[in-house]
Image (tube, grey):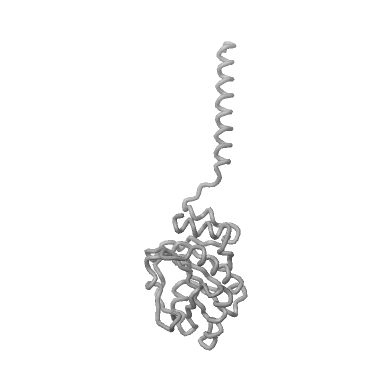
Amino acid sequence: MSRSVARYALLALFVIGAGVIVYALASAMSGPKHADPLERYIEGDLAGLDLSRAGEALPAGTFSGPEGETLSLEDFRGKTLLVNFWATWCAPCEREMPHLGALETARGGSDFEVIAISVDQSTDEAYARERIDELTGGVLTFYHAPPESWDLIYNAGARGFPTTVVYGPDGSEIARLAGEADWSEGIALAFVDEVLGH
């Protein structure tokens, strides 16, 4: 092999090697690719965010409104809902409630609503109504599904409290979170903004 051919071969190997290194660095710096854009919010307070049931329909079942009227989640179709199942005997639920009130203040309106549904016993309804007012400064409306009316809770797949499920305006599930989160700032607020398309 002539000296000039060897020189060109070495130069070609150098160029290919440099190209591979540049490609590897560029790929590493671009970060992980997510099939679902909401996956990037699975961290911090939302580390337990579950997208596996996305697309499932609103659960059947009823609950009581602030005046004792019978409601279902279908009554709220057309807006994005953050539905939170909570109880006064659940310390994480109570810690989370002020953040849900702050989220409703920040983002609530014609296209988004936080619906906090108390799962307390019927005998504790007055206390639960009082607590949600105390914990949120009266921002959140009182909704109630006592154990004898837990079809909604079972159908929503809530296995413990608090459980939060986000539904789109078409009634399909977007994501859920078992456990408490600070919904009023950071990654959680960015997640809500993404869901709302801000």
- Image height check: is 2 above or below 149? above
What is the quadrant of residue 171 in the picture? bottom left
Across and down, in percent, residue 86 comes to 54, 75
> What quarter of the picture does the N terminus occupy?
top right
In the foreground, 168 or 78: 78
Going by the picture, which residue comes out furthest to the bottom? 123
State left or right for residue 33 relative to residue 70.
Answer: right
- Image height check: is 170 above or below 28? below
x 58%, y 70%: residue: 98
Across and down, in percent, residue 90 comes to 60, 77
* Number of numbered discs: 0
Across and down, in percent, residue 106 comes to 51, 63
In the foreground, 159 or 95: 95
In the foreground, 90 or 33: 90
Question: Can residue 7 be seen in the rendering of this structure?
Answer: yes
x 61%, y 71%: residue: 95
Question: Can residue 167 be seen in the rendering of this structure?
Answer: no
Across and down, in percent, residue 97 comes to 57, 71
x 41%, y 77%: residue: 61
- Image height check: is 155 above or below 44? below
What is the quadrant of residue 130 in the picture? bottom right
- Image height check: is 177 above or below 66? above
